[in-house]
Image: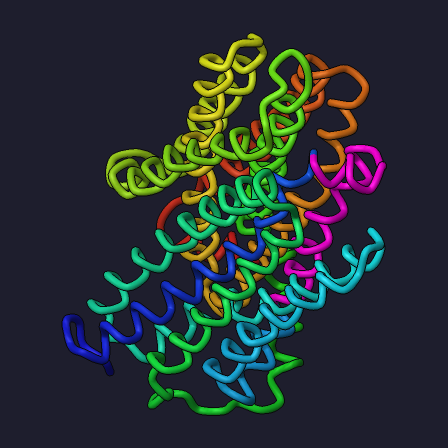
Amino acid sequence: MIEFGTPQYRRVTLSLALGSFLVFCNLYLFQPMLPFMATHFSVSETQINWVFAAATLALSFSLVPWAVGSENIGRRVVMLSGLIAMPVIGVMMLFFDSLISLVLLRALMGVALAAFASVAVAYMVEELSAKAFSHAIGTYIAANSLGGISGRIVGGTLTDALGWKEAVLVIACFTIVGVLLVAWLLPQQQNFKPQKGMMRYHNRALISHLKNRTIWLAMLIGGLNFALFVNLYSVMGFRLVAPPHQLPIGLASLIFLCYLAGTLSSTLTSVWSDRKEPIQGMLLGTTISLAGMLIAYFDHLVWMTLGLLLISFGAFFTHTLAYAWVSQKAKRAKATATALYLVHYYIGGSIGGFYLIYCWQHGGWQAVIYGGSVLYAGIYWLCFRLEGKSKPTGVNSVIIDNKK
């Protein structure tokens, strides 16, 4: 096993953090562009959301197949295959001018992104010692966040300054360089053992996780939470470029710096978990996020920015606790359980966009508040249900939970 502080540890940490940065940079590149793209293709806000949703939907449905496939051919091969495909797909976007072609290519991009996202953590678990893994995972998650922020800001500013195709080309070129570095830095696996014939095992594990309400309810919380979080940002992008603000796309994309509040709150969950119950934390995070949506009602940049900071802080707090809950409560096939959580997470983000953007189209931010409140109410209800399912403690609770 690779120990903390060794040259091999630094190679693994740097390469996986860079790969994660590239994945999330490409995933969220188009989110700030949506107002511009709606005008460019002369379609509605709801229709243009397919450019973003196609990638997240395809990613969500590809996570488990890639994870299962990696059991046969290895994690490193799967990760590098996905990374190599990313700039190729990006360049292909430059040769098509129709919205349908762009949506299809974005869906293909989602499949490629899932290859890395589905097995990177499994690679770390297998190759790193426990101490090394506990340090490396923090760097990896931070790279997720920074990649998402960077992709959005670069996408928005370059589109504003040069055009959307130029933004895609710049990111594709940057991705090529990054992929070459990852391929050079990432060591060959030493502790991987191919396991063939795992399809039946994973299918049974998926069914058992979905039947276990203690796990499945947390997955639903994660899905609704992300549906609100990521798409309140999308709606805010449309709001800022419309009258009375009429901000340029590049300036409007700076709202994604508010994600840093979520980066902070995710690090605070460990402190919370040491002293309080995770479900109470999910309720608290949801309440903070809800307060942010309500504060953003006031049509001033200061209040809207404060609202986004609270939305980010609360949503990341809830997400981190729900994600950890699934990992801890799954008594077997933990990798399958966490992958299934991410499936719910990204499906929620995809479908939630059409829902909240539709609300925006037909009633502005006030309608978004009404529609969003329904989703927040759903999270509260799920949290209370989850609390009821997890009340028993000790050995008996494990037995009861596994029978549900």
Q: Position of residue 137 (x, y in %)?
A: 32, 61
Q: Up-down: is 166 above or below 172?
A: above
Q: Residue at x 49, y 17 (%)?
A: 291
Q: Position of residue 378 (x, y in %)?
A: 64, 30
Image: 398 above or below 263: below
Residue 404 visible? The answer is: no
Q: Residue at x 66, y 80 (%)?
A: 200
Residue 41 drawn in magenta: yes
- Which residue does the image show at 44% across and 38% down from the upper left? 316
Q: Give the image quarter of residue 262.
A: top left
In this rendered view, identify the residue nearer to me: 90 or 284.
Answer: 90
Q: Quadrant of the N terminus?
A: bottom left
Nearer-the-camera pick, 140 or 37: 37
Tally of numbered tags: 0
Q: Is residue 207 above or below residue 291?
A: below
**Residue, x 76% and y 37% (percent of image)?**
354
**Horizontal side of residue 173 vs 243, given as left or right:** left
Tell me which secondary structure the magenta stretch mostly adopts: helix
Magenta residue span: 36-63
30 drawn magenta: no
Residue 88 pos. (x, y %): 63, 72
Residue farthest along the left direction in this orientation: 5
Residue 82 position by quadrant: bottom right
Residue 22: x and y in percent read 47, 61
Question: Who is closer to the viewer here, 67 or 282?
Answer: 67
Structure colour scheme: rainbow
Q: Where is 282 relative to 303, above or below?
A: below
Q: Is residue 296 visible?
A: yes
Going by the picture, which residue comes out furthest to the front? Answer: 162
